[in-house]
Image (cartoon, rainbow, N blue to C red):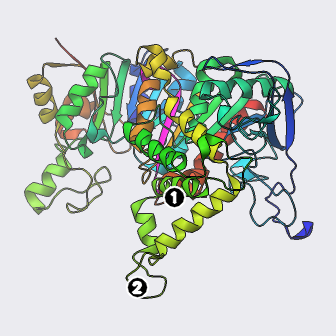
Amino acid sequence: MSLRTDQSLIAEWIKTGSRVLDLGCGDGTLMEHLQEHQEVKGYGLEIDEENIVECIHKGVDVIQTDLDKGLSEFKKNTFDYVIMTQTLQAIRYPDKLLKEMTRVGREAIVTFPNMGHWKNRIQLALAGHMPKSKTLPYEWYNTPNIHLCTLTDFENLCAANNIEILNRATVDHEHQSSLGMKLFPNLLGEIAIYRFRQND
Amino acid sequence: MQESTRPVDNVGLVEPKTAHFSETLALASGSELHSFDIVYETYGELNKERSNAILICHALSGDHHVAGYHTPQDKKPGWWDNAIGPNKAIDTNRFFVVSPNNIGGCSGSTGPLTTNSDTGKPYGPDFPLVTVKDWVKTQAMLADQLGIDVWAVIVGGSLGGMQCLEWSIAYPDRLKHTFVIAAAPKLSTQNIAFNEVARQAIRSDRHFNDGHYYETDDKPELGLMLARMLGHITYLSDDALDEKFGRELRDGEIKFGYEAEFQIESYLRYQGRAFVGRFDANSYLLLTKVLDYFDPASDAGGSLAKAMAPATAEFLVISFSSDWRFSPERSQEIVSALLDADKCVSYIEIQSKQGHDSFLMPIPRYHQVLSTALDRIAEGLGIS
């Protein structure tokens, strides 16, 4: 199965032979790719049973886990990278989980939908309703995305927690990047991708 | 039952085999068995490479009869027939399944019912206490006799799952994968407490006679029945019992007496009596002790992760949401230790209503997980 662009970017950032923990690993596509092409070892954490079966099918080691309960199973710096794609916004305590990610991994990578994208801003400012898009397809009352943020919000949280951002990229809902996004990421980027680590 | 009417997904008629071992077996307790037998069944065919063998480790009251029927008249197939057979989750078209009866039991392998050659009488209560380590050692000896150097998978539920853990520690090179189902890394205090009540029920039966009851007409049936009734409650969930029986009365009204009034009472009595017909009290006592003693971490300074360090198998750990005897948290202890020890492991908690007994039930997601994992293993072995 081919990777989404955000996953491809992540794969580029990950060194061959690394140990990786993938939080909310879904059907295991990214871990399978990393195992097959980059000699990566590690585990996926996932809550959905069907996804877990799919991971087992792919030969991805998967542990059924509720991420809201933290990562206490894992010791400090057990992994080179702890990844979480498109899940941060559905986590109950994203600030705590980010800290957990940087405790368990030497580096961490997250992707999330950017609430600061111009279409979201217009929907709220002019149409007066909660933003909906291909990236954010839910109604306000049934969305699993309880902690949406913008790039600025995320970077402020990192700064407050002494988390150093090592890489930043943005893509659109088709997971393409553009020059505009590079110039005005918080306005034009639909999906944000960050690599970061905890500074002591 | 006619051959033609038997379901096509069944292994059909099977015959138990006996492996004899004439060498002395040194047991963990320090005792010895000068020779012993293991009764076992096999389903499917061992391939030319001898790489497709699956070992099934049974639980407390299980035995070697896992799938198929012994006679056409049998009403029930083996205890895990819903999972083992042609095109089933554990597919006997692809895998060679071996299921031994552990020593100390009462289904044919050497145990308390066996005649002690030194005395010419059944061992009875003098049969030495055995451990999971002893069992795994005898299973390895059986594997030698069958010419199986490496198991593709070792599968076990409950006490069977404990044998899986012991295999992976004691003989890491002799298994590729293991499915540890509804298990625990050791009994909890509460588990031991339940076992003690069961033992006291048997030992205080007036016919128990310190275990020397084979020569008499009276057996400690009441004690064994009580032990089983107690055990049975712990195998089921509160919800499952409630759903099945509720507060339903046998005769529709309260009779103000001590005969079985509620349906659950007569059900438990029935289960207890049925068990007495097929199980030996001395074996039951011994088997509860096997459970109590299992604690691989105790050999590694209390660290299960350290205990698991030698393991090289890939683990699949499965728990059931309604299991309170060996709850999902107990399986998670195993998973945590395996993660800590940097082992290959996957873990899933299956949603179920039937409590600890869920591991015997044909729950679709559960069987899907087994078959998906086995598909992948078969692929790795080059078995179509």
Q: Measuring 53% from the left and 45% from the top, which residue is drawn there? A: B203
Label 1 sits on what residue type? Answer: Met
Q: Measuring 21% from the left and 63% from the top, which residue is drawn there? A: A141
Chain of the residue where label 2 is placed in the rendered structure: B
Q: In the image, is residue B347 part of the stretch drawn in magenta?
A: yes
Query: Do we see residue A61 in this rendering?
Result: no
Residue A135 pos. (x, y %)? 31, 49
Horizontal side of B230 relative to B290 (left or right) equals left
Q: Are marks 1 and 2 in contact (CB under 8 Å)?
A: no
Q: In the image, is residue B308 part of the stretch drawn in magenta?
A: no
Residue B62 pos. (x, y %)? 66, 47
Image position of A142 with respect to A9: above or below: below
Q: Count the marks: how many?
A: 2
Which one is closest to the eye, mark 1 or mark 2? 2
Q: Quadrant of the C terminus of chain A?
A: top left
Horizontal side of B99 relative to B70 (left or right) equals left
Residue B34 pos. (x, y %)? 79, 21
Chain of the residue where label 1 is placed in the rendered structure: B
Label 2 sits on what residue type? Answer: Lys
Q: Tell me where the magenta segment starts and ends, as one range.
A: B339-352
Q: Which residue of the protein is positioned furthest toward the top in this rendering?
A: A200
Q: Measuring 28% from the left and 54% from the top, which residue is drawn there? A: A133
In the depicted view, which residue is nearer to us: B230 or A115? B230
Residue occupied by mark 1? B229
Q: Are marks 1 and 2 on the same chain?
A: yes
Image position of B77 with respect to A31: above or below: below
Residue occupied by mark 2? B255
Image position of A63 with respect to B23: above or below: below
| Label 2 residue SS | loop
Disc 1 versus disc 2: distance between alpha carbons?
23 Å
